Amino acid sequence: MKKLGFENLNKIFEEALGYWHSEPEDDMSFDTDCNKTALTLIYKNYLLWHEEDKARRDDVEASFIAQVKRNIDKLNQARNDLIEKLDEEILIYIQANGKPAISDDYNSETAGSIVDRLSIMALKSYHMLEDTQRIDITEEHKKKSQTKYQTLCTQKEDLYNALEKLIQSYLNGEKVIKLYKQFKMYNDPSLNPEVYNRK
């Protein structure tokens, strides 16, 4: 999977999150050999995670929450676009390097969607580990967070292994790779009735 830039994806995602959380300016200046689309995807999820946190605040004006919700919509659209772009890159890679399909079997979840899930798990594990290091929690709380962190680490590893197997099955011709489009309607003014009915 090296040519796709997915090698050591969990480790790279972990390092990228550490970098972005420590830098005063949140940008994409994280140097790595990781697939650039996958890296941009986790960056968008990193921004989305923190906007979602803001949306739960109850000590701010409604206008603040409204803006946060709009930010979330834009980030979610960018996230979905990146998943589709990643799937297109994977398709091109498989077509160039894989064997002809010997089966009509296919996967209901795309490889790009799995990378998206890996990036979200990376965020969960990062923040769960952070929670275990708080000084304002009880020992019971700390132990629960430590257990959850270990579970997330196992789930990340399992999911990455599933991604590797899926890519290999495409390369071997054991599964047919398909592109799936999200067609997010709420962000399209021509498809959202709350928008086009008011024009």
Image (cartoon, rainbow, N blue to C red):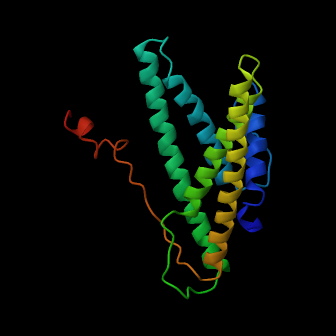
Left or right: 72, with 111 as reference point = left
Most extreme residue toward the front, as rendered?
A: 140
Q: Residue at x 59, y 57 (%)?
A: 114
Residue 21 lies, with reference to residue 3, above or below; the image says: above
Number of numbered callouts drawn: 0
Residue 123 position, x and y percent, is 66, 40
Residue 115 position, x and y percent, is 62, 55
Most foreground residue, 64 or 28:
64
Residue 43 lies, with reference to residue 177, above or below; the image says: above
Most foreground residue, 153 or 98:
153
Q: Quadrant of the C terminus?
A: top left
Q: Residue at x 55, y 56 (%)?
A: 113
Q: Residue at x 74, y 51 (%)?
A: 10
Residue 116 visible in the displayed image: yes
Q: Residue at x 58, y 70 (%)?
A: 91
Left or right: 57, with 12 as reference point = left
Residue 42 lies, with reference to residue 194, above or below; the image says: below
Residue 25 visible in the displayed image: no
Residue 158 position, x and y percent, is 68, 59
Residue 180 position, x and y percent, is 45, 63
Q: Quadrant of the N terminus?
A: bottom right
> In the picture, residue 161 is in which quadrant?
bottom right
